[in-house]
Amino acid sequence: MAHARRQLRSGTVVLGGMGLLAAALTACSSDPDKRCVDRDSYTAAKGYQVVSDKNCGSTKSAVNAGYYYGGKKKSGWVSGGSFTKPRSGSGGSSSGGHSVHRGGFGSGHGSSGG
């Protein structure tokens, strides 16, 4: 009986830890991954060069800087993202900003029997 109780406690700790991890990941994923880049530095092989964030916050910057969202960073360069900030709660849709609606109960689409 003591062995079963010990197993239950360790299982509870693992499940509780997984819940905390899930909550932390959800909180982090709501903030889009953004980097300040030089818009004029683009090359097909590397993407855009990452520069200091103060270049994106100043109108007197020496470079044509802007925030670049998403993508993969490699050796001070980032590619595969966008200059368009993702909308909150978009669910990672890649439909070009258009939502897809499908029929279902109460959708108002389709024919009514009669």
Image: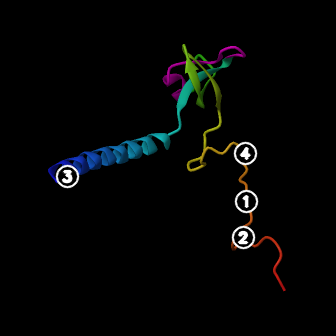
Magenta range is: 42-58
C-alpha gap between disc 3 and disc 4: 50 Å
Whether tag 1 and tag 3 are in contact, CB under 8 A, the answer is no
C-alpha gap between disc 4 and disc 1: 12 Å
At horizontal 56% and vertical 21% (from top left) the residue drawn is 73
Circle nearer the N terminus (2, 4): 4
Circle nearer the N terminus (3, 4): 3
Picture coordinates of residue 90, whole percent (x, y): 61, 48
Circle nearer the N terminus (2, 3): 3
Q: Amino acid at mark 1?
A: His
Circle nearer the N terminus (4, 1): 4
C-alpha gap between disc 1 and disc 2: 9 Å
Nearer to the camera, 110 or 52: 110
Q: Is residue 80 left or right of residue 5?
A: right
Q: Nearer the viewer, mark 2 or mark 3?
A: 3
**Residue with the most extreme front position:** 1
Whether tag 3 and tag 4 are in contact, CB under 8 A, the answer is no
Q: Amino acid at mark 2?
A: Ser
**Quarter of the image that includes the C terminus:** bottom right
Q: Is residue 53 magenta?
A: yes
At horizontal 69% and vertical 42% (from top left) the residue drawn is 94
Mark 3 crowd level (few <14, some 14–19, many ≥20, 10 Å Cα): few
Whether tag 1 and tag 2 are in contact, CB under 8 A, the answer is yes
According to the picture, the residue beneath numbered tag 4 turns out to be: 95
Vertical comparison of 30 with 55: above or below: below
* SS for callout 2: loop
At horizontal 21% and vertical 51% (from top left) the residue drawn is 4
According to the picture, the residue beneath numbered tag 2 turns out to be: 107
Q: Amino acid at mark 3?
A: Arg
According to the picture, the residue beneath numbered tag 3 turns out to be: 5
